[in-house]
Image: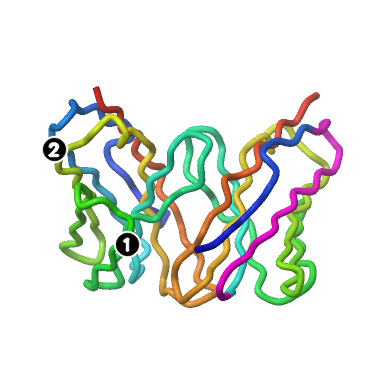
């Protein structure tokens, strides 16, 4: 089985930066995904990392360290619409994604 | 726009009454997945189709079945829903099953069991 851990909740102020950490223990590794999920809606794809390092996409960046089994999602210039749950998911085989329980980010004015 | 569509968005059924959830996709993807997500929990994979090849997860109850009559459509059948089956059911698709293939999710069907 897989073990994927991320904090349950985080709160930050509009305009600030928040970093969501994810640690994983898997039997194999074929990439790590971050998804955003607004309440009552489906997850939407944010980023994919398979090699160590930082991937930047506008206000969102994702980092991976395979040797440490660690990733983070960095959200910059927070906006109210960024209030959502952020899911870390690891692909351990050819197809199966194992998801973390998600980190609920609340952005306050 | 190409997308993953789920119908209905909200479904209410009675304890033990069979229910079918529908998913369609215009992405022409080979793989279709069904996930169950309960409140504040991670999505849990029930099964997936790789083209016509059905792949069941070991811990998916027999109460859950699936059909994929063609590339575009996939159905989730719950033969005898119990109160514990109340959840959001998410359909997802991907082009293939290799590492970089992203899964794209539909809006989900929220199932209530009375």
Which is nearer the eye, A64 or B10? A64
Residue A16 is marked as none
From the image, tell me which residue sits under label 2: B18
* Res. A55 image quadrant: bottom right
Left or right side of A53 for B111:
left
State the residue at coordinates (45%, 66%): A96
Crowding near pointer 1: few (<14 within 10 Å), some, many (20+)? few
Q: Is residue A24 magenta?
A: yes
Q: Quadrant of the C terminus of chain B?
A: top left
Expressed as whole percent of the image width and height from the top left, the position of residue B93 reads 39, 61
From the image, tell me which residue sits under label 1: B58
Q: Is residue B47 magenta?
A: no
Expressed as whole percent of the image width and height from the top left, the position of residue A49 reads 67, 69
The answer to whether mark 2 and mark 1 are in CB contact below 8 A is no
Q: What element does badge 1 sit on? A: loop
Left or right side of A47 for B34:
left
Region of the chain picked out in magenta, as a range: A12-28
State the residue at coordinates (41%, 71%): B95
């Amino acid at each position: 089985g897989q073990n994927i851990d991320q904090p349950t909740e985080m709160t930050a102020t509009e305009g600030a930066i928040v970093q969501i950490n994810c640690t994983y223990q898997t039997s194999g590794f074929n990439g790590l995904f971050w998804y955003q999920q607004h309440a009552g809606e489906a997850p939407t794809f944010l980023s994919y990392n398979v090699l160590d390092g930082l991937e930047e996409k506008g206000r969102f960046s994702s980092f991976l360290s395979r040797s440490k089994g660690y990733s983070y999602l960095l959200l910059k210039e927070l906006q109210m619409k960024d209030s959502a749950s952020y899911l870390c998911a690891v692909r351990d085989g050819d197809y199966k994604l194992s998801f973390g329980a998600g980190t609920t980010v609340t952005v306050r004015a | 726009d190409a997308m993953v569509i789920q119908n209905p968005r909200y479904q209410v059924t009675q304890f033990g009454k069979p229910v079918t959830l529908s998913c369609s996709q215009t992405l022409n993807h080979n793989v279709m997945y069904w996930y169950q997500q309960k409140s504040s929990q991670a999505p849990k994979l029930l099964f997936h189709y790789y083209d016509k090849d059905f792949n069941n997860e070991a811990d998916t109850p027999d109460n859950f079945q699936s059909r994929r009559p063609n590339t575009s459509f996939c159905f989730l059948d719950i033969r005898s829903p119990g109160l514990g089956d109340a959840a959001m059911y998410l359909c997802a698709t991907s082009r293939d099953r290799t590492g970089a293939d992203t899964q794209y999710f539909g809006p989900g069907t929220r199932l209530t069991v009375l």
